[in-house]
Amino acid sequence: MADVARVAGVSPMTVSRAFKLDASVSAARREAILAVAEELGYVFDSTASNLRSQKSDFVAVTVPSINNANFADTVRGLTDGLKARRLQILLGSTDYDMAEEERLVEQFLRRRPEAIVITGGKHSDRCRRLLAAAGLPVVETWDLPEAPIGHVVGFSNAAAVRGMVDHFVGKGLTRIAFLGGDVGQDTRGADRRFGFIAAMQAHGLAADRLIAAGPPPISMREGADAMARLLATMPDTEAVICVSDLSAFGALTECQRRGVAVPGRISISGFGDYEIGSVSVPALSTINPFPRQIGARTAALILDVLDGRQTTPAFVEITPDLLIRESSV
């Protein structure tokens, strides 16, 4: 910093203020300082500044998987929303493991983020205690927890699947199966499974066509294998609701491989509104949970909390959209 200050003909404090976008430094002077820094290859070290200000300038985020398009969209919406304030994302993947989530949360809190965003509303007891005692904004997303730790931006996975069950029953279909959502690691998938069971029972229908597809995240291959088991054990099934679009696409291809007409012989739907579902033949019916909107609304909420505009716990409910396409017409 002293080298940049000497070449630019300013004090080191002015260099520091220029990098922090302090209003006391004019635009012209800041541009000149940054040009010198670029020429010298200087990168501003914010560590000391952060120690003085007690600000880390990052938001910690946990996601179950980094190769899931839905969670990637949520992170993109969150990143875009925080960009104007120069807040960065520190991302951790839990691999659908509550113990790993607890470890990540502990590691994040040691670095004192400005806020922490957690995917899901179910956590280990210790993780809940860590978050509750953190003294910083906590936002649970992709769920509507019964006992929120702080703020919530999410939706009911169970209610979303009930809407798809109602659609199929409205078409006169009664032998409906659910593929995936093993009870265990994927709590959101489990909620979709429970929503399916509750909706079927509400219609007075049997909810025993439950096909496990393996541990999350469920792949297209696992969706195809699960569909093969369903066709072998319950060939009279009229419709199947899959825990995700990837598993639904696998189920669709398995039907095509076996010459089972979709939707003529069996209807198929997924969850997530992935791009693959809209370009498949036939296009997959699905549920759009608006993942990018979840990220954008979370970012806006964090800024409101940090700026003092939001002083009480917020509960932001997203309403998923039922998309009926060719696979269930």
Image (tube, rainbow, N blue to C red):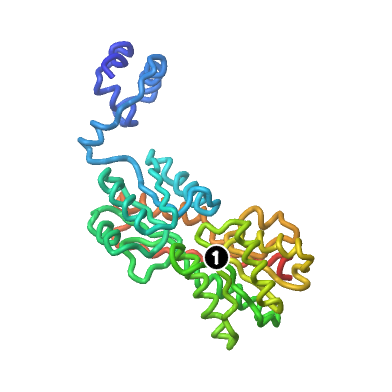
Between 25 and 6, which is closer to the camera in this rendering? 6
Between 313 and 43, which is closer to the camera in this rendering? 43
Between 13 and 224, which is closer to the camera in this rendering? 224
Type of the residue with mark 1: Pro
Q: Is residue 256 above or below residue 19?
A: below
Q: Position of residue 114 (x, y in %)?
A: 30, 46
- Furthest residue toward bottom: 204
Residue identified by numbered label 1: 320
Q: Is residue 294 above or below residue 234?
A: above
Q: Is residue 266 above or below residue 291?
A: below
Task: Please indicate whether residue 12 sits to the left or right of residue 222 in the image.
Answer: left
Q: Quadrant of the C terminus?
A: bottom right
Residue drawn at x 22%, y 41% as measured from the top left: 54
Task: Please indicate whether residue 21 sits to the left or right of residue 322 in the image.
Answer: left
Q: Position of residue 321 (x, y in %)?
A: 58, 65
Q: Quadrant of the N terminus?
A: top left
Task: Please indicate whether residue 167 sits to the left or right of residue 3 in the image.
Answer: right
Q: Position of residue 306 (x, y in %)?
A: 31, 49
Between 102 and 329, which is closer to the camera in this rendering? 102
Give the image quarter of residue 18: top left
Give the image quarter of residue 127: bottom left
- Within 10 Å of disc 1 (Cα), the crowding (few <14, some 14-19, many 20+) is many
Q: Position of residue 108 (x, y in %)?
A: 31, 47
Residue drawn at x 30%, y 28% as measured from the top left: 45
